[in-house]
Amino acid sequence: MRVVVIGGGVIGAASAWRLALRGIDVILLEQFGTGHTRGASHGSSRIFRHAYDNDVYTELAVHAGRLWDELDAASGAEPVLTRTGAVDHGPSAVIAARAASLARVGRPFDIVAPAAAERRWPGMRFDTSVLHNPDAGRLHADRAVASLLARAQENGADVLHDNPVHDIKLLSDGVEVVTRSGAHRADAVVSAAGAWTPELASGLPDIALPELRTTQEQPAHFAPIDESLTWPSFVHHPGGALNEADHAGGIYGLSSEHGIKVGEHATGPEVIPSSRSFVADPAGEERLRAYASRWLPGVDSGSAASVTCLYTCSPDHNFVVDRRGRVTIAAGFSGHGFKFAPAVGEYVTDLVTGVSTVPVGGLSTLFGLGGRVR
Ligand SMILES: Cc1cc2nc3c(=O)[nH]c(=O)nc-3n(C[C@H](O)[C@H](O)[C@H](O)COP(=O)(O)OP(=O)(O)OC[C@H]3O[C@@H](n4cnc5c(N)ncnc54)[C@H](O)[C@@H]3O)c2cc1C
């Protein structure tokens, strides 16, 4: 079987790896160069955590953790997943729902009182009990994408950068994927095109995508004031003392080689991916400085250095991963897809081959095209 994967972000790269491991002849086509910064998967850090309020995501994160470990074992190089632990804090109902899911799925966690949490993580302030997930941590984003592509190639995949796909033609006996330099015939195609998915998939019959909204988001890196402090990855949920008017989607953060990265979740302006400005909004950067000054005594709050990146959000923020005939779509990762990438890649492979291996139930209901809000 021959499959063309469109998109060399983390989802396309992971899909190529898992497809190639299953013995499939894979070609991955990416429109930009290696390590480009125009999509959603670049940079040095992403949070890896299990604490969701929906067991499907919690279980999928557990499975993804196994596959990140498998990737790191296969590469033998510096690991992409580092288990620093992660904390959630904010309204008690939000914390309780995540703790309950971790308990049901059988992952370790502990609840830490605010004063004890400040002693343990002195770079942070807490006003509510804290959910600590010790086997969570962070992923090195650029190294992860590079390692996934390298492992895909080791298993026989062809990876072609600077190859924009202009058209997908459905034939009676296969598909033809058309690029500037020629056409690739295959048995099936996987579209993992991030923010470009609607323009790529718009002409395809039977693919009724939910509305996918693309926004430019802008986390900032802050200089730590003491290099010896340890930092868990963190999510500060909105409500309570975190002013919802200022940070409607909550705040996330983690340590990285560029400093302590802090971002608002899903507050950026809607953009067209091919013509966005890449310029961070000064008001957003100021909100992150104000947050750091109040909640992160371990950073120099004046030192914000913003970066920009794309979110592609479905209406319910659930992923869109489904197959119609010879076309599989993997899109709408809604600002939280990186951690799951190898498990999504395996699910994509299950959909393409019709052989189910991902040990998580409920994926077709949560991610399927049928019955979605449009
Ligand atoms: C600021 C920020 C912080 C985040 N933090 C986290 C986090 O902490 N934890 C987490 O789990 N997730 C996080 N995410 C979300 C995560 O990074 C994304 O969900 C994930 O990277 C999406 O990957 P993707 O492959 O779908 O998209 P992309 O990385 O955008 O990849 C799509 C690729 O398809 C290519 N492409 C598009 N059209 C074509 C075409 N016609 N021909 C060829 N190639 C094409 C594009 O060039 C692009 O490289 C964050 C995202 C952002 C922006």
Image (cartoon, grey):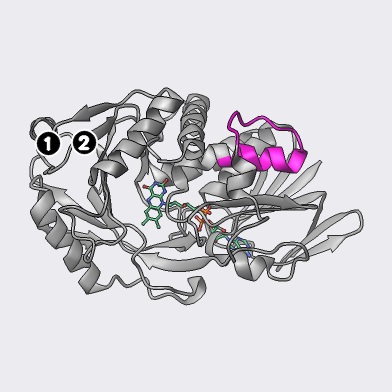
Q: Which residues are magenta?
A: 344-361
In percent of width and height, residue 189 lies at 73, 53
Q: Which mark is residue 130?
A: 2
Depth check: give the residue in front, 64 or 250: 250
Which quadrant does the N terminus fall into? top right
> Does any portion of residue 305 appear in the rendered image?
yes
Q: Residues within 10 Å of mark 1 (few under 14, many from 20)?
A: some
Q: Identify residue for label 1.
A: 114
Furthest-front residue in this view: 93
Please, what is the three-letter code of the amino acid marked with disc 2? Val
Asked if the magenta segment contains residue 260, the reply would be no
What amino acid type is highlighted by mark number 1? Pro
Instruction: State whether residue 78 appears in this view.
Output: no
- Residue at 42 percent across and 54 percent down: it is 335
Dot 2 beta carbon under 8 Å from ligand 1: no
* Vertical relation: 6 (above or below) 126: below
Can residue 354 be found in the magenta stretch?
Answer: yes
Q: Residue at x 60, y 41 (%)?
A: 363
Q: Position of residue 166 (x, y in %)?
A: 69, 69
Q: Are marks 1 and 2 in contact (CB under 8 Å)?
A: yes
**Residue 194, which numbered label?**
none
**For the point 63% across and 36% down, which residue is it?**
18
In this picture, residue 289 sits left or right of residue 221: left
